[in-house]
């Protein structure tokens, strides 16, 4: 492990909102193009007394950044407690199980705060998933103090992005810039609501690009030294022209507050997520089917073992594994190859490879350039979805199942001695009720897939819909600890929102 890695591990990555749950932790392209065209264009940069003039950029962007208050209502849930002494005495008198008790627990109403960015005049707003996750109500306040109730259009935990909407017209939409055009050392502004101080603007430079931190499933962060703090989550990172180039998401800190660097999700990723959430209700994830590491890291690791490695290049992604029946296997990629470009765009590390793939949908054809035996080659791959097909997938209509699911909290995992699971918090008429699933049960597996998030359940449904028997096999546990099984037939009434899957574009 090198010294840089040790320094990163010694600090804390903090999301920048006031969390609802834990307190402090750390295409439709026409709308985006319209926002870019219609928003005020500020001058590139004017030299004043030797300094870059960022006043126009601040003025053109501050009205496009909103304050978001997220509220999670009080909830009642059933928890099971265990008293070993009562259980022991129960066993002595022939009454086993006396140590187990069920009781109703009322969780308090919780509130959190963050920021968001208006991207269209008709009320679409981008923010972070962790700002709105678990919220029952969303209040959006504009810079002029106008308030709106917002609804969630869609969320993507993998990129930590969410799209919400207010019913309004002629809102001050921000101009959308291209984050690929950013250069190291370029001036940027962070605009948001840290510590509930609305309309706060700080300045800094781009410190690094395509930074991977291991915090999200897909990430290629813009690193900046513009001061950002709790409450900046979902706010705007803008360039000297006042164009949006990133959504602020995290800070790197040893103290819990700003001490050097913040991280933003680039607009190249944001644009694709927004387009997918609008059109499909879920993000279409294109998969190449390789696992790998930055080639420089691989070479360094081999040197530490005493091995001298010459792969013919020191820039790219070393392919450590090729997934069976994947796009990469069809392409002919092998372990030991080094991917250096996608569609002519240079790839120097894994984060850049991820960022390039996030801009595609299943079914898209891409040209992969790679080095093998010190020779560069190029071949065309057809990208697949996570289930191995080339179809784009619609959002799963959970109303058909009639159940409200949520991941187990840390407290429940400890009480129930479970590593994962989805709690059934409500059941109404639907396929779950018909299969015998009841409120309070914990769903452990669906078709042998471990359930950790609601997205896991949705993915299991999509995979089953593509299988020949279209069946969900559910393994669950009751509040008393009894294991139960249930079978759901998906052959009728489960096409996403009544639609058939669409082919990739």
Image (tube, rainbow, N blue to C red):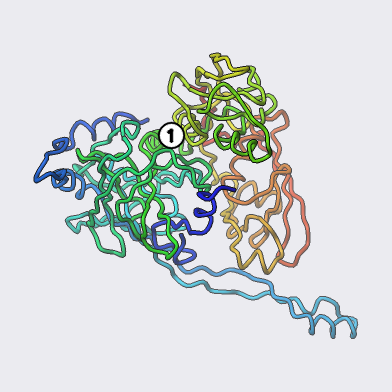
Q: Nearer the viewer, residue 355 or 492?
A: 355
Q: Nearer the viewer, residue 354 or 51?
A: 51
Residue 331 visible from this viewpoint: no
Horizontally, residue 468 falls left or right of residue 30, namely right
Image height check: is 417 above or below 501? below
Q: How many marks?
A: 1
Provide residue 320's location: percent of width, then percent of height: 65, 31
Image height check: is 147 above or below 450? below
Q: Kindly indicate the quadrant of the structure image that contains residue 110.
A: bottom left
Residue 214 visible from this viewpoint: yes
Q: Nearer the viewer, residue 11 or 314?
A: 314
Residue at 18% across, 48% down = 58
Q: Kindly indicate the quadrant of the structure image that contains residue 446.
A: top right
Provide residue 132's location: percent of width, then percent of height: 41, 54
Horizontally, residue 65 falls left or right of residue 450, namely left
Q: Which residue is mark 1?
A: 276
Provide residue 309's location: percent of width, then percent of height: 63, 28
Q: Nearer the viewer, residue 115 or 171?
A: 115
């Amino acid at each position: 492990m090198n010294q840089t890695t040790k320094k990163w591990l010694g600090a804390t990555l903090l999301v920048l909102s006031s969390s609802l749950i834990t307190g402090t932790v750390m295409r439709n392209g026409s709308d985006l193009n319209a926002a870019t065209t219609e928003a005020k264009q500020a001058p590139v940069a004017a030299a004043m007394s030797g300094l870059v003039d960022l006043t126009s950029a601040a003025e053109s962007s501050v009205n496009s950044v909103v304050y978001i208050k997220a509220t999670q209502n009080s909830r009642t849930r059933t928890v099971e407690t265990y008293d070993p002494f009562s259980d022991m005495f129960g066993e002595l008198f022939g009454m086993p199980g006396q140590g187990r008790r069920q009781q109703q627990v009322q969780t308090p109403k919780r509130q959190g705060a963050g920021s968001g960015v208006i991207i269209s005049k008709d009320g679409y707003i981008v923010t972070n998933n962790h700002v709105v996750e678990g919220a029952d109500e969303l209040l959006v306040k504009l810079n002029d103090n106008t308030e709106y109730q917002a609804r969630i259009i869609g969320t993507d935990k993998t990129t930590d992005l969410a799209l919400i909407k207010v019913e309004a017209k002629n809102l001050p939409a921000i101009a959308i810039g291209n984050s690929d055009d950013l250069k190291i050392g370029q001036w940027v502004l962070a605009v948001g609501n840290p510590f509930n101080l609305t309309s706060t603007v700080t300045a800094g430079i781009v410190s690094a690009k395509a930074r991977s931190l291991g915090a999200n499933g897909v990430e290629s962060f813009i690193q900046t030294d513009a001061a950002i703090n709790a409450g900046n989550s979902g706010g705007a990172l803008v360039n000297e022209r006042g164009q949006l180039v990133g959504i602020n998401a995290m800070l790197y800190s040893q103290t819990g507050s700003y001490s050097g660097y913040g991280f933003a999700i680039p607009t190249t990723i944001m644009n694709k997520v927004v387009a997918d959430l609008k059109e499909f209700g879920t993000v279409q994830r294109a998969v190449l089917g390789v696992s790998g590491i930055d080639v420089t890291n691989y070479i360094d690791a081999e040197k530490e073992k005493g091995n001298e490695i010459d792969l013919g290049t020191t820039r790219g992604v070393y392919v450590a594994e090729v997934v069976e029946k994947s796009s990469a296997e069809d392409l002919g990629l092998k372990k030991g190859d080094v991917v250096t470009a996608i569609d002519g765009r240079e790839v120097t590390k894994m984060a850049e490879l991820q960022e390039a793939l996030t801009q595609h949908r299943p079914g898209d054809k891409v040209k992969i350039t790679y080095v093998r035996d010190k020779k560069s080659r190029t071949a065309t791959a057809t990208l697949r979805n996570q289930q191995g097909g080339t179809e784009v997938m619609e959002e799963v209509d959970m109303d058909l199942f009639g159940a409200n699911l949520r991941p187990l909290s840390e407290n429940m995992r400890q009480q129930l001695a479970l590593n994962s699971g989805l709690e059934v918090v409500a059941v109404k008429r639907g396929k779950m009720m018909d299969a015998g699933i009841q409120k309070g049960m914990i769903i452990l597996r669906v078709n042998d897939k471990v359930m950790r998030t609601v997205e896991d359940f949705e993915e299991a449904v999509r995979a089953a819909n593509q299988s020949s028997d279209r069946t969900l096999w559910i393994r669950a546990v009751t509040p008393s600890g009894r294991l139960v099984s249930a079978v759901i037939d998906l052959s009728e009434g489960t096409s996403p929102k009544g639609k058939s899957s669409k082919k990739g574009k």
